Image (tube, helix red, strand yellow):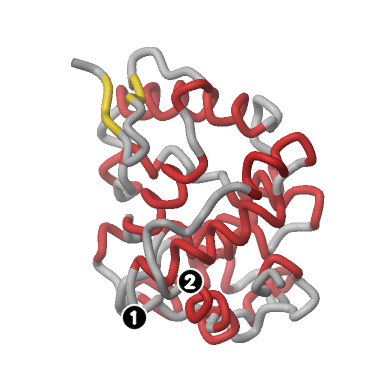
Amino acid sequence: MTAATTSSDLAVDFLRPSPTQIRFEDIALGLSKCCRFAGQCRGHYSVAQHSVLVALLLPEELRWEGLLHDATEAFMGDLSTPLKSMLPDYRKIEARLDAAIRIRAGLPSAPHPAVKRADQIALAIEARDLMPPSALDWPEVRVVLEDPKCQRELQRTVSPAQSWAQAYPLFINALQSLAPNHLHKELAGLEDIQTTDSDVAVSEYLQIYPVAQRSDDFMRPRA
């Protein structure tokens, strides 16, 4: 058996992933319930929140890609980087699934370098705000914290959501706001069926990202 069942009752086949197996609500739910740093951080800081932070750190034309840069983790979980380096087959499986998600989302086949940079800056912010002090000595964190070109982005701060039920509607809101035109109709039909406190969760976005620019429309609840 090489397939995993999703909340929408589809099967994502890790051996032969296909764009037809990918639903955005499954991505939102999986990322909202999946903690960064294998859960070894302060509070419930989800990959969904991380993904929105990465999107915020990018120019408008790259935010959709930034939002979905870790979408594979909705189905595969968030393994720590040291563990991934010991599992070469994991990287191959992840690459296949990422390719299917990129086709489904209308993204280029190759990641944009700016998305990787934003991901590294987000890691530094999260390590500083959510992890024990030793995380500041991680080489990939230290290089960002000491880079003069990153100081503006490092003014942002993050806090964990109270639960996955806060992170889920935030990610749905970002999906609906950042998606390309050909996906607007599909994503506009998404309903927050997983939680009943979405209005409260979205209104608390600025508490989760207190330094976020208020001009970012996808931070705001839709009328």
Q: Which residue appears at 26% of the width and 34% of the height?
A: 86
**Mark 1 or 2 closer to N-term?**
1
Q: CA distance from mark 1 to mark 2?
A: 33 Å
In the image: residue 70, left or right of residue 134: right
Q: Nearer the viewer, residue 48 or 57?
A: 48
Q: Nearer the viewer, residue 176 or 138?
A: 176
The amino acid at mark 1 is Pro
How far across and how far down the image is residue 194, in percent? 37, 58
Q: Which residue appears at 71% of the width and 73% of the height?
A: 148
Within 10 Å of disc 2 (Cα), the crowding (few <14, some 14-19, many 20+) is many
Q: Nearer the viewer, residue 97 or 18?
A: 18
Q: Quadrant of the C terminus?
A: bottom right
Q: Secondary structure at mark 1?
A: helix
Q: Quadrant of the N terminus?
A: top left
In the image: residue 105, left or right of residue 76: right
Q: Is residue 143 above or below residue 208?
A: above
In the image: residue 14, left or right of residue 51: left
Residue under label 2, please give it. 198
How far across and how far down the image is residue 190, in percent? 55, 49
Q: Secondary structure at mark 2?
A: helix
- Where, by quadrant of the figure, is residue 133 drawn? bottom left
Q: Which residue appears at 32% of the width and 28% of the height?
A: 90
Q: Nearer the viewer, residue 30 or 54?
A: 30
Residue under label 1, please give it. 133
